[in-house]
Structures are given as structure tokens and as C-alpha cells.
Image (cartoon, rainbow, N blue to C red):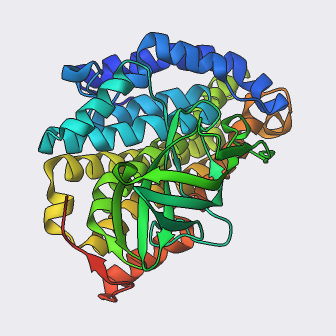
């Protein structure tokens, strides 16, 4: 269904649309060959899209969360893998821009200006095999040394590391979890090119290994007690990352819906009751996702999410948004098979790539079971973990 957008939302959607239409032409080759879309990044850099969520006064486009969401959705309509990868840059910059606007932190300003000058591309590298990616613990270890820490460990699902200059990562130091900033060009960092998955292939979310990596004290941006749900992590990671993930997966499904609609019109079956009913079900699913996305953006931008909810309740809210979007996208793709029939199974057509791409959504953080646990526990007043309530 058509969205009712503000002038600024429409401006960013049109920018994303021009890119998405080009990326859609390249997506099949990158998916088939399992290659990272460096060509797409060149276009996003030149168009200014990489600066989408940076403050205008620092050289960015100044998109708020509510303005970034439809732009990410539109980009994902053309190429879900590129949208998911660049989201690992755009979302953190949006998080930190919001903090900078509130605090005026000069070190954060320098960091954001570097990004605005295309000197920095970000990646979030916190996932590890065998641990839930909840930002409460890590198997990667930190050992104290003069002036900082030595980090050792291996992360997986390192999305955007093919092009990123820096990443955020986590390491355990005793009973504390450290959140660190790392230069990916450091010789102690190895990116293992082992990504060969069913979907989201062009993200090239390879493993990242840290071997005696020195992290100076000033690059440790936060620490929290192991096993705690943390207010700063809620504000600067999950309140932005979860809706951004949701917007990407919703966008992939919207792209599939638009493709399916063109097929049924071309085939002259648009007026068939089964077709109209199936299309309606998909439209409803995707509008449900948009509704929770924009409600969330309003709660975050107004400050109500942090002011009125506990940390656990806030995390549950974030998990709900991502859960609804990702699972609705999977359901929408399944329903669209009824409409497009055998075309859904044709390798050279884009539908099958879109179907494969959305399957990654339910196990990305918060994975389905983790999101339901947060929502259920919060609804029943069950404390899942101690919380660190002090906001930055």
C-alpha cells in the first residue's frame, strides 16, 4: 500500500529508490557468485547515502530514525543484502548522532565528522558461536596491560567487514563486559572469508578473529557487569538496531510483493479472487510491520521508551519490533508463492533470492526465542537478569 510520507521521508526514499533500482540489476550476480557489492558502496558513497543518519551540521543528511526506516526499506526492495550490510553502518551512526545531539561530546563529534568525510565505515561485530547475541557476555577475552587491554577471540556474522574501516566488538574482562572500538586494518585482526550461506550471500558476513589485539583504554567505549541488561546498550544499540533490521526485512518482502503484482497484472489474473485475497493478506502483514516500526521510532525519538520503561521492558519492546517485521516478511513470502506459482522456484528470477534472504531474519538478534522470552517475562513481571539502569 502507498505510504503517507513527510517531505523529508519522501526525499530519502527517492534517493534510496534510485540506488535500489541500480542495485537490483546487480543483485543476481553478487548472490550467485557470493561476492560483496563494492560497486554498490561506491554509488552509496557518491550519492551521500552513507551519511544518511549523520547530523546535518556535521556534514550528514540528518535523517531521524523515522526518516531512515522507509529509506532502508526502499533500498532493501532492490537488494536485501546490500541494505542489511550498509545498515551495520547507518544504524550505529544514527545511534551515536542521537547521543551527540544530547551530550555534545567532542570525541563523538570528531568520530562523526570522520564518517561524514567518508574516512570511516562501521561494522558491529559481537556475535559468537554458541552464545546468544544479547550484549551481556562474550567468549572473547580481554587481558589488562599497560594503557589498555589485549583482546583474543573469534566472532562470526561479521556483516559489512568487507568494506568497514572500524568495528565495535565485545570482550570479557573478569566480571565485566567491555565494548570496544577496533580498527579492522590492525595486523592483529584477521577476516576469514568463510561466508557461504543460503541467503544474504552478498553481505559477506565473514568471521573476524582477534589475536593479541591491543585496545587502548580510550577505545573502550563502555563496560557493564556480565549478565546484566544495560541501559546504555538499550539506548545506543538495540533501540536503533532492531527497527533497522526490521525495516530491511520488511523491504525485501515489499520488493517481492511489487514484483508479484507486476507478474499477475502481466498475466491478466489480477482480478481473480484468490489473487486479490493473497495480495491483501501480504499487504496487511507488511502494514502491520510498518505500524510497529513507526510507533517505535516515535517512542525512541520522544524519549518515552527510555523514560517510561525499565531496561528489560525497553529491550522487549525492541525485540517485538524486529520479531513482527522478520516473521511477517517470512509469512508474506510464503503467501506470495500462491500468487506467483512456479515462478517462485525459477533460479534466474529474483523472487527465489528474496525468499532465501528473508529466512535470515528470525535468527538474527533478537532471535525469535529470545524476543519471546523478553516479551513474555516482561508481561508477567519476571526479571530475566539484573539491570544497569543509569543512562549515559
Task: State the residue at coordinates (79%, 23%).
Answer: 29
Task: Decide if residue 68 is on the left or right side of residue 180.
Answer: left
Task: State the residue at coordinates (52%, 66%).
Answer: 142
Q: Residue furthest front?
A: 146
> Does 93 appear above or below 46?
below
Task: Decide if residue 249 is on the left or right side of residue 242.
Answer: right
Task: Decide if residue 208 is on the left or right side of residue 183.
Answer: right
Task: Decide if residue 347 is on the left or right side of residue 51.
Answer: right
> Does 382 appear above or below 164?
below
> Does 57 appear above or below 88?
above
* Quadrant of residue 10 within the rendered picture: top left
* Quadrant of residue 205 within the rendered picture: top right
Q: Residue furthest top?
A: 46
- Quarter of the picture containing the C terminus is bottom left
Report the front residue among 361 and 365.
365
- Residue 367 % position (x, y): 55, 65
Amino acid at each position: 500500500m502507498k505510504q503517507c510520507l513527510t517531505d523529508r521521508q519522501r526525499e530519502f526514499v527517492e534517493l534510496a529508490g534510485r540506488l535500489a533500482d541500480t542495485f537490483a540489476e546487480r543483485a543476481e550476480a553478487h548472490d550467485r557468485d557470493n561476492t560483496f557489492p563494492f560497486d554498490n558502496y561506491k554509488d552509496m558513497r557518491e550519492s551521500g547515502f552513507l551519511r544518511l543518519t549523520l547530523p546535518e551540521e556535521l556534514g550528514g543528511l540528518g535523517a531521524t530514525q523515522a526518516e531512515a526506516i522507509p529509506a532502508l526499506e526502499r533500498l532493501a526492495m532492490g537488494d536485501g543484502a546490500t541494505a542489511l550490510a550498509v545498515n551495520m553502518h547507518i544504524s550505529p551512526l544514527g545511534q551515536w548522532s542521537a547521543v551527540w545531539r544530547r551530550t555534545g561530546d567532542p570525541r563523538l563529534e570528531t568520530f562523526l565528522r570522520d564518517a561524514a568525510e567518508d574516512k570511516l565505515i562501521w561494522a558491529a561485530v559481537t556475535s559468537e558461536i554458541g552464545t546468544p547475541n544479547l550484549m551481556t557476555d562474550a567468549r572473547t577475552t580481554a587481558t589488562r596491560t599497560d594503557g589498555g587491554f589485549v583482546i583474543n577471540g573469534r566472532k562470526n556474522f561479521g556483516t559489512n567487514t568487507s568494506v568497514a574501516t572500524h568495528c565495535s566488538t565485545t570482550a570479557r574482562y573478569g566480571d565485566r563486559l567491555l565494548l570496544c572500538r577496533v580498527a579492522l586494518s590492525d595486523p592483529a585482526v584477521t577476516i576469514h572469508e568463510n561466508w557461504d550461506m543460503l541467503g544474504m550471500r552478498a553481505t559477506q558476513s565473514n568471521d573476524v578473529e582477534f589475536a593479541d589485539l591491543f585496545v587502548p583504554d580510550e577505545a573502550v567505549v563502555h563496560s557493564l557487569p556480565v549478565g546484566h541488561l544495560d541501559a546504555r546498550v538499550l539506548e545506543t544499540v538495540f533501540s536503533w538496531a532492531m527497527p533497522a533490521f526490521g525495516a530491511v526485512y520488511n523491504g525485501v518482502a515489499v520488493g517481492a510483493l511489487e514484483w508479484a503484482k507486476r507478474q499477475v497484472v502481466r498475466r491478466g489474473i489480477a482480478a481473480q479472487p484468490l489473487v486479490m485475497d493473497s495480495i491483501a493478506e501480504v499487504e496487511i502483514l507488511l502494514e502491520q510491520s510498518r505500524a510497529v516500526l513507526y510507533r517505535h521510532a516515535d517512542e525512541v525519538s520522544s524519549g518515552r521508551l527510555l523514560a517510561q520503561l525499565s531496561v528489560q521492558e525497553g529491550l522487549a519492546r525492541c525485540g517485538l519490533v524486529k520479531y513482527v517485521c522478520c516473521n511477517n516478511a517470512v509469512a508474506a513470502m510464503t503467501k506470495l508463492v500462491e500468487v506467483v506459482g512456479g515462478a517462485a522456484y525459477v533460479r534466474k528470477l529474483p523472487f527465489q533470492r528474496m525468499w532465501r534472504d528473508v529466512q535470515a531474519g528470525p535468527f538474527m538478534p533478537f532471535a525469535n526465542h529470545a524476543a519471546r522470552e523478553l516479551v513474555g517475562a516482561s508481561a508477567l513481571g519476571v526479571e530475566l537478569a539484573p539491570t544497569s539502569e543509569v543512562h549515559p
